[in-house]
Image (spheres, rainbow, N blue to C red):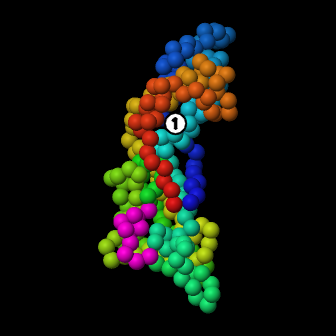
Amino acid sequence: MGLIALEPSSNPVSLAQVKQHLRIVNDIDIAPSGSIPASSSDDPTLTVYLEAALEYAETQTRQQFCERQWQLTRVAFPGRHRHSDYAFNDGVADWFPVHNLHDDRREIKLPKPPLISVQSVQYIDPSGNNQTLSPTVYTVDNTVRPGRIVLNPGQCWPTTGHYANAVTIAFTAGYSDAVPMILQELIQLLVGHYYENREGAIDRTISVVPMAVQSIINQEMYPEIVG
């Protein structure tokens, strides 16, 4: 399974917010015109920390904060894969449908909750042609987290060709309204930790995680999507 972001991530916390959180006062150097600049010498550093904090928070919670486009690739649809019970055709292991499927074989869970929408489900058929799965075949369920694509009654997943990434799903994830305050607070706490412990933050990693940060991560983390 592969996951690719199709656009940059936006930060729900602004530079002004984090400066207020950290009580950082703007520089008071008065320009020749008499105006006072609304920036501080720490702004470039804080901007980098904001980016690092967002990346860390989204990675650890496995959530998407602000709305973002993603592309998920799979080797095949659920229930159509290779395993120890190969079906052989002229001595060649072939793909085959799994019958008496469990519920999890009728759905595809999508990473980066919360799910907003699914733009398309595409696949490569056995002849090597690109196909788009009709939306009448499945239902997009974004009422649960993680969100999922579920086969409709009487439908089954199509057969794919033997390709590394035969199935491609384009979807949008993130909070369509305001990002919850607890997640914004997580970012601000992380920026504060980077700012106060610069020697403990190397290449966007954190060697020691504050208890408040870890507590929020434990509360807001979703299971990893595998397969």
Q: Is residue 156 above or below residue 56?
A: below
Element at badge 1?
A: helix
| Magenta residue check for 100 | yes
Would residue 188 be found to the left or right of residue 178 on screen? right
Choose between 8 and 154: the one closer to the eye.
Answer: 154
* Picture quadrant of residue 160: bottom right
Whole-percent x, y for residue 106 in the image: 39, 68
Whole-percent x, y for residue 154 in the image: 33, 77
Whole-percent x, y for residue 149 in the image: 40, 62
Q: How many marks?
A: 1
Q: Is residue 179 above or below residue 188?
A: below
Q: Quadrant of the N terminus?
A: bottom right
Q: Which stretch did the figure color magenta? A: 98-108
**Residue wearing tag 1:** 57
Q: Residue at x 40, y 31 (%)?
A: 182
Choose between 154 and 17: the one closer to the eye.
Answer: 154
Q: Which residue is at the far front? A: 84
Q: Residue at x 54, y 22 (%)?
A: 192
| Magenta residue check for 106 | yes
